[in-house]
Amino acid sequence: MAREQGQKMVAQNKKARHDYAIEDTFEAGLVLQGTEVKSLRMGRASLVDGFVDIDRNEAWLLNVHIPEYTQGTWTNHAARRKRKLLLNRAEIDKIERRVNEKGLTVIPLSLYFVDGRAKVEIGLAKGKKSWDKRHTIAERTAKREVEQAVGRRLKGMSD
């Protein structure tokens, strides 16, 4: 059987980009059990409640829901188990330092396969207030209106 090539998206945490201001992102590998990989290949996962914890110089992914593999046996995995992240020591130290200094949190943004290996994109995030969210939406709307006006002008249409 040929190896997978390219990138295959499994799950995204779209709400995270709405609720948090992402300051920095990292790509980490995941330590998974066999049935977890099969369940992910079926495209089943939820990152909504997930977060990353640094414990004894190791990064752990918590509260990410990977449902049990439907055709698994007694060797099936627990759906919300603690999963180890594979990061360099320097990356773990950098994340831990910034979380302790600035009061940031680390959340999973997306889960995907790269050349057959499961990866998770994690982000250092700061929570947004409700007025920050409204401001972001207003900026996005204004930008869209400007692009539409420029497009109409280039086509020779009136405003």
Image: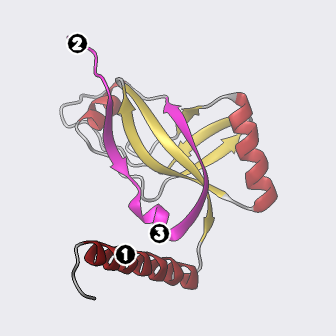
Q: Mark 3, residues whose alpha carbon is within 10 Å: few (<14), some, or many (≥20)?
A: some
Q: Residue 118 in the image: x percent, y percent?
A: 41, 31
**Is the residue 120 above or below the residue 107 in the image?**
above
> What segment is highlighted magenta in the picture?
1-30
When asked about the image quadrant of residue 116, the answer is: top left
In terms of secondary structure, where does tag 1 sit?
helix
The residue drawn where x is 19% and y is 37% is: 70
Q: Residue furthest toward the bottom?
A: 159
Q: Residue 126 in the image: x percent, y percent?
A: 64, 65
When asked about the image quadrant of residue 114, the answer is: top left
Tag nearer the camera, 1 or 2: 1
Q: Which residue is mark 2?
A: 2
Q: Which residue is mark 3?
A: 18
Q: Which residue is mark 1?
A: 144
Residue 137 sits inside the magenta stretch: no
Alpha-carbon span between mark 3 and mark 1: 18 Å
Tag 1: amino acid: Arg
Q: Which mark is residue 104?
A: none
Alpha-carbon span between mark 1 and mark 2: 43 Å
Alpha-carbon span between mark 3 and mark 2: 39 Å
